[in-house]
Image: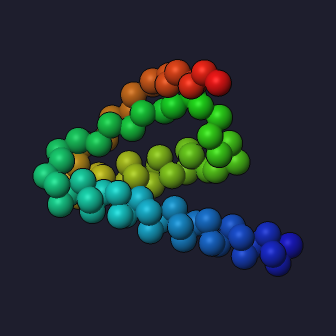
Amino acid sequence: AKLSAKHHRRINTFLKQTSAEVIAFAERNGCRKVIWERETTGFLESFPWQEFESLIERQAALRGIAFERCEATVPTPSK
């Protein structure tokens, strides 16, 4: 339980820091809108994507940047 809690705290810290960095980058580059594309790739399935998306949306709102969700399916590369 201790290791699980530690891992959860690390993931939460990473999500908060990374979402703040993404929006700071958008702000520095003069973006007025962030478009979040939900991709169906199976990439890193255990990652808390919904929580990350929510944090980015919250950070964008705090800085006056619009946030838009875009349902996009990305074709998987053929092998």
Q: Quadrant of the C terminus?
A: top right
Q: Percent x, y for residue 47?
A: 64, 50
- The image shows residue 68 at horizontal and vertical percentages of 33, 35
Residue at the farthest right position: 1
The one nearer the camera, 28 or 69, is 28
Compared across the picture, whether 9 is left or right of 29 comes to right
Marker count (numbered): 0
Q: Residue at x 49, y 33 (%)?
A: 38
Q: Residue at x 55, y 44 (%)?
A: 50
Residue 50 visible from this viewpoint: yes
**Residue 19's image quarter?**
bottom left
Quarter holding the N terminus? Answer: bottom right
Vertical position of residue 25 compared to residue 54: above or below = below
Q: Residue at x 18, y 47 (%)?
A: 31
Corner quadrant of residue 45: top right
Q: Is residue 2 left or right of residue 40?
A: right
Please give the name of the residue rendered at 39% of the width and 28% of the height, measured from the top-left corner. 70
Q: Is 12 left or right of 18, judged from the image as shown?
A: right
Residue 24, percent from left and from top? 27, 62
Query: Residue 75 at x, y = what percent?
Result: 52, 21
Q: Is residue 3 above or below residue 39?
A: below
Does residue 62 appear in the picture of this structure? no
